[in-house]
Amino acid sequence: MTALLNDTLLRALRREPTTHTPIWLMRQAGRYLPEYNVVRQRAGSFMKLCQTPELATEVTLQPLERFRLDAAILFSDILTIPDAMGLGLEFADGEGPRFSRPLRDETDVARLTVPDMAKLRYVFDAVSSIKRALVGRLPLLGFAGSPFTLACYMIEGAGSADFSRVRRMLYARPDLLHRILDVNTESVAEYLSQQIAHGADAVMLFDTWGGLLAHEAYEQFSASCMRSVVERVRAMHASVPVIVFTKGGGQWLERIADIGCDAVGIDWTTDIGAARRRIGARVAIQGNLDPIALLSTPKVIESQARAILAAAGNEPGHVFNLGHGIVPSTPVENVEALVECVHQATGRPDFDARATYREMAENRAPRGSSRS
Amino acid sequence: MTALLNDTLLRALRREPTTHTPIWLMRQAGRYLPEYNVVRQRAGSFMKLCQTPELATEVTLQPLERFRLDAAILFSDILTIPDAMGLGLEFADGEGPRFSRPLRDETDVARLTVPDMAKLRYVFDAVSSIKRALVGRLPLLGFAGSPFTLACYMIEGAGSADFSRVRRMLYARPDLLHRILDVNTESVAEYLSQQIAHGADAVMLFDTWGGLLAHEAYEQFSASCMRSVVERVRAMHASVPVIVFTKGGGQWLERIADIGCDAVGIDWTTDIGAARRRIGARVAIQGNLDPIALLSTPKVIESQARAILAAAGNEPGHVFNLGHGIVPSTPVENVEALVECVHQATGRPDFDARATYREMAENRAPRGSSRS
């Protein structure tokens, strides 16, 4: 393992003392950044952007040129795995993801298999490429959707307010759902292990829809699968930190901490002080500013961020983040204000990685970027 | 107060011993019932149905003809109040509610006032009419949306996955949101008091979107308003039980119990056993079968319902219900199976109220109902 110039995130995830509270932001590379939209336009489609390692690298680094963040996160999508399974992922403009061949009946489920990881090579190539581009400055986070969250989209065929198809299958045909989850669990474990093998320094499981489950169903159909993913990843890469984030999982923090992960992500509805008291002696905690607070003013953002830092306390094991992804209408200067506030309150990285990445961006500029 | 032949619900809400566990179901009158759709068709529109006391009475009683339930709940909508404020409520077919004049700027907010309750007379007339039709068999539940949940729709103008407009206002212009909430609080308190004055035996506050709030914001912008509503209603009608239901509020059960209500409704994600241990000594608890479980089979429903009854224990103060409203695709026979299961497990009402309401329905039949 190469030593990183700034390994604060990794230390915090292991609950080791750090010089400052590390900060990164879910969806830190995305539509709120004008330079992202330029590259997205150039790529032609969101999936093309994910599938072109050079472009995925470029957008992954964009927020690091602007903000003094403590980590890069792979630019990709949680639905790459079911796409590689043959479900046909599509992103219509202005709409969410959609599968052209969702799992509609027993035959579809029976046919489902762990995808050939060669089909996901574009992701692993992006990881390698980003890792090279980071030149040892910052850690790179890999990620995957949780087995249950992938199943939500695979069965529903698209996003949904309540994912009633998967919840119905859970009660009516738990055998089918378990078969899907078994395939997903193996796929996610293999996918994350490959990301790590290609250079990811830590990985995160996004359980975006686990919070829709009844408490017992959460254990059976989401937590147990994530536990199995974590065990499999650990078996191959014992020292790489794993973060588990169940949106809407505030009631189940103890269960999530018991999955065997290093850190638990919490959404904005949970009191981070209470979360630290409940599980902070066992695992690190990541979160949890309401992303909608970033639509207000620097003053309000500062007050909200300071409240979170105060509640989280000064003990090791807090990674500052949002409670969900940045929304596209977020003003860039508000993100700047947030990062600045966290640094003012808790200290900042010893060196400024931004210069490195800006320089690299300059070198890329002749390729048609609109940046001066 | 007239004595009711079956006051089990009211006893359970007061945590008094009961002969059996009372059961009613959120949205028990609705689209899953073929006879509802006939009346809905006859009414011409959903709002017309709400606004015609005779028809609202007919659909309120429909589930009581089929199932041996322990309560009637007023057939109406939570958005009647903002409609009476002049926001222009519309229900396009197949879509959710929409306001033609949502609160878009400071002037709109400044102009907002508590509506003349005369504009809501159709609701109070429906309450009186239903109360008469119940002929003392069962208690009648009135209801209202919580001040915050009403504000969500008033500001967003329609339903939304994340209600980011109201959450943005909360951070950027809390003064405006407080003004809206003050008006809503007074309106909801007056509205519920009038429902009680016209015959409602208990009332319920539906805080459908409070669960979207950060923990502190929940206290400031939803719980505190509901507390104020409960206090005002209590001041006028000290003995009428109040139920408070915050969907997604499982993390905050203690705070909700502290609002001063008699019972806390819980959604399907919360472990009812844990909920009883946390707050069951202070308040009654209502819930909490996943409504999607009703899309499976009677056998699965029975197993799920029995697990809830076992977890809730035998102490007084449990009202069986769903964790959210019945979905339209629910098979009627599955609802029947659920009610039967709860009765088999815990006992049933001393008398069968269904005959009374069936007879009344027969007498209405010549008016063009398709029922034989």
Image (spheres, coloured by chain):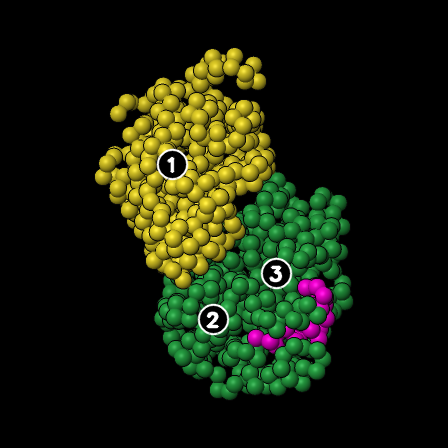
Chain colours: A green, B yellow
Camera-nearest label, 3 or 1: 1
Q: Are marks 3 and 1 in contact (CB under 8 Å)?
A: no
Does residue B196 appear in this view? Answer: yes
Q: Is residue B89 magenta?
A: no
Q: Is residue A70 visible?
A: no
Q: Based on the displayed image, in which of its 4 quarters is residue B231 positioned?
A: top left
The tag on residue A334 is: 2
Magenta stretch? A43-63
* Residue type (three-letter) at the residue carrying disc 3: Gly
Q: Which residue is mark 1?
A: B143
Q: Which amino acid type corresponds to the residue marked 2 in the rendered image?
A: Asn
In the image, is A41 to the left or to the right of B213?
A: right
Q: Badge 3: how crowded within 10 Å, few (<14), some, or many (20+)?
A: many
Residue displayed at 65% across by 77% down: A370
Q: For this view, does A3 lie left or right of residue B123?
A: right
In the image, residue B353 lies at what x, y percent? Answer: 42, 20
Sequence-wise first label, 3 or 2:
3
What is the secondary structure assignment of the residue under circle 1? strand
